[in-house]
Amino acid sequence: MNALMKDFLFYLMAFLGILIMFISVINIGIIDTKNKKSEQKKSKSKHVKLLIFGLIVFVLSRILHGQIL
């Protein structure tokens, strides 16, 4: 694989990680507002796991690309 293709894949991986984190944060905020209005509380654990997964994907892409460490 040439260098341009590797760079593109690492940037795509970083973008997907950020996108997963962004969607998770929005969903956590929506659940918080719904929990304040209702008595039945919804769990946020699935979205927190997705947030952590997105962070791992982002950091891993930066490490593999050589921008961290």
Image (tube, helix red, strand yellow):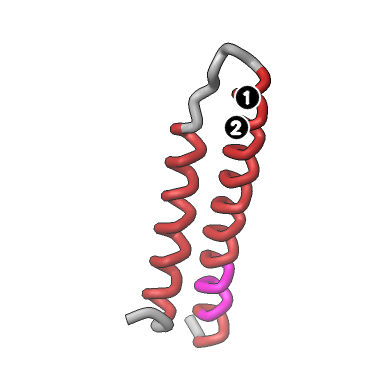
Instruction: Tell me the SS state at disc 2.
Output: helix
> Which residue shows up at 52% across the image and 65% down it?
13
Label 2 environment density (alpha carbons within 10 Å; few <14, some 14–19, many ≥20): some
Most extreme residue toward the bottom, as rendered?
3
Amino acid at the residue labelled 1? Lys
Do residues under tags 2 and 1 come within 8 Å of each other at their CB atoms?
yes
Image disc number at residue 63: none
Image height of 31 relative to 39, above or below: below
Image height of 67 relative to 31, above or below: below
Quarter of the picture holding the C terminus: bottom left
Q: Nearer the viewer, residue 51 or 33?
A: 33
Q: Nearer the viewer, residue 62 or 12?
A: 62
Region in magenta? 7-12
The residue identified by callout 2 is: 32
Left or right: where 30 falls relative to 11: right
Left or right: where 30 falls relative to 7: right
Q: Nearer the viewer, residue 68 or 38?
A: 38
> Which residue shows up at 38% across the image and 79% down it?
68
The residue identified by callout 1 is: 36
Where residue 1 sits in the image (x, y, percent)? 48, 81
> Which residue shows up at 56% across the image and 73% down it?
11
Amino acid at the residue labelled 2? Asp
Q: Nearer the viewer, residue 36 or 54?
A: 36
> Which residue shows up at 49% across the image and 25% down it?
43
